Amino acid sequence: MDIEQFMQGYKAAWEQRDESLFCALFAADGEYRNTPFAVQRGQAQLAEYWRRVRLQEDVEVRFEILAASPSGGIAHWHVTYQVASEELFQIWARSTGTNLVARKPGDPLPRMVLDGVLKAEFENGLCRECRIWWHGMPAG
């Protein structure tokens, strides 16, 4: 696997909201670091974390490869999605540390924009470690 193949799989897993596609990208003990301080390690933790994408609808993922080597790479990614549950909105709102979006009860859930960078390292054809740095905000 190289960074282009990984990102194609990452895009498919996110747009199809499918944890099995996501897990298939990683070694059995692979790591996904969705923040500098959080790590999901191994297939069970990866699948559990990725299930939250089911709370997103109309997901669109774009990416561009910034650097590639036989053992890894770096990509810039951009995602938009419709928040499909109050639970997901609250997860996001807590993670921002700000009152970026003030919603009143009954207000529609926002469409979100995420922009980030991903660094992946590969071994034996699978991802050994993936780290992402990202920011999200409501669209428009």
Image: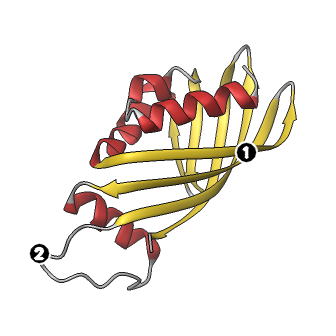
Residue drawn at the location 20% of the way across and 70% of the way down: 108
Quadrant containing the C terminus is bottom left
Q: Which of the 4 image quarters holds residue 30?
A: top right
What is the CA distance from the residue labelled 1 to the residue labelled 2?
37 Å
Amino acid residing under circle 2 = Gly
Q: Mark 1 points at which residue?
A: 64
Residue 34 seen from this side: yes
**Residue 86, disc:** none
Amino acid tagged 1: Glu
Residue in the picture at 46% in, 23% down: 21
In this picture, residue 7 sits left or right of residue 123: left
Residue lying furthest front: 140
Crowding near pointer 2: few (<14 within 10 Å), some, many (20+)? Answer: few
**Residue 123 position (above or below residue 18):** above
Q: Quadrant of residue 72?
A: top right
Left or right, 96 with respect to 130, comes to left
Q: Residues within 10 Å of mark 1 (few under 14, many from 20)?
A: few
> From the viewer's perspective, is residue 27 above or below residue 67?
above
Establish if 7 lies above or below 114. Answer: above
Say which residue label 2 marks.
106
* Sequence-earlier tag: 1 or 2: 1
Q: Position of residue 22 (x, y in %)?
A: 48, 29
User: Under tag 2, what secondary structure?
Assistant: loop
Are the residues flagged by discs 1 and 2 in contact, CB closer than 8 Å?
A: no
Residue 36 in view, yes or no: no
Task: For mark 1, give the secondary structure.
Answer: strand
Frontmost residue, 20 versus 82: 82
Residue under the point 33% across and 38% down: 51
List x then y, in percent, for residue 137. 47, 71
